[in-house]
Amino acid sequence: MDSPFSPAVVSIFIPATTILAVLFATVLWYRVSLVKVRDDEEGTSESLLEAGVGADATVAAKVADIQDAITDGATGFLATEYKYIFFFMTIFSAVIFVLLGSQDGFKTKYTTDVDGRPQAPGLFIAIFSTLSFILGATTSSISGYLGMMIATYANGRTALEARKGVAPAFMTAFRSGAVMGFLLSGLGLLILFVAIVGFKLLYFKDDWAGLYECITGYGLGGSTIALFGRVGGGIYTKAADVGADLVGKVEKDIPEDDPRNPAVIADNVGDNVGDIAGMGADLFGSFAEATCAALVVSSLSSLGAGRCIDGNCLAGSHNWAAMNYPLMLTGCGIIV
């Protein structure tokens, strides 16, 4: 029977926890969807508080109108932002490829360093690092988009549940937040593990140092998207907030956060794309960077590439279970 830390158990445990995270997030999304907001009746101009507890159909219709406006705005903003990010990522990927590949003149064969360790050729380091960068950026974008979608999906439902009391509103908001958390950690861990296994099988074999040097691009890609999400969304929401206050309250005497003011809708759009989509990408970037850093350190230890003392090099133990310890920690965190 395999030990708890055998390579087979580790290779099964890590993807199993990611699947568990995605399934649990799906269940939470379903629980949030049980709160209905859509109704055939058209919305009115009265506020949710003025409508009274008995006017459930009217309130639901108004919440649906506001939620649809915020969702459309947030989706449109992200689509435009990701379009410009795509052009930036294309250029930056080319820069990474050229800089890494030109270190040794785009060599295609393994060499040895001063300590006698095998050193991967620059061309393949450039290829796999660029691919890791693209994977990290794509995963970060997906994490931010999914977080924004569940947020806009749950905003109106939380408002309706708040009319029943604090507890129902808190549970709706908590479940929607947990959806993003579990999807982010599950997808991030799964794609990182698949990338490691895929790169190892395709080219690197037992070259742990070269493998994890390329994997660091995963964290860089996630952080790059987080920069755009946090800064772009933050500037957007602050501009909309100031505009709502200046035009709505000062010039038109409209109460603060009144949905009749278009700038208020834009402010809520900014909150979703900046504080939620941007935060989702930021959290993913932090997770990817910390995990990749731990993997790089371990790859240069006696567990991976081995060690050299005074020119005497000892081969690494190539302990697959120990090398994946950072990923095991994340998997255990998902379960806990």
Image (tube, grey):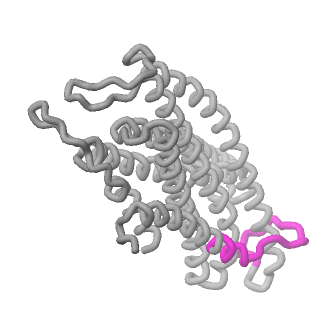
Foreground of the two, 124 or 47: 124
| Residue at the extreme top | 105
- Residue 42 position, x and y percent, is 88, 67
- Residue 59 position, x and y percent, is 78, 74
Quarter of the image for residue 114 reads top left
69 lies above or below 121: below
Horizontal side of residue 280 vs 80, given as left or right? left
Q: Residue at x 37, y 64 (%)?
A: 6
Tag count: 0
* Residue 245 appears in the figure: no
Foreground of the two, 47 or 63: 63
172 lies above or below 285: below
* Residue 306 appears in the figure: yes
| Residue at the extreme left | 310
100 lies above or below 66: above
- Residue 18 position, x and y percent, is 53, 63
Q: Residue at x 56, y 47 (%)?
A: 139
Q: Quadrant of the N terminus?
A: bottom left
Q: Which residues are magenta?
A: 28-51
Horizontal side of residue 284 vs 304, given as left or right? right
Foreground of the two, 22 or 117: 117
- Residue 118 position, x and y percent, is 31, 31
Foreground of the two, 316 or 33: 316
Q: Quadrant of the C terminus?
A: bottom left
| Residue 41 lies in the magenta stretch | yes
| Residue 326 lies in the magenta stretch | no
Q: Residue at x 58, y 72 (%)?
A: 24
Q: Residue at x 79, y 80 (%)?
A: 56
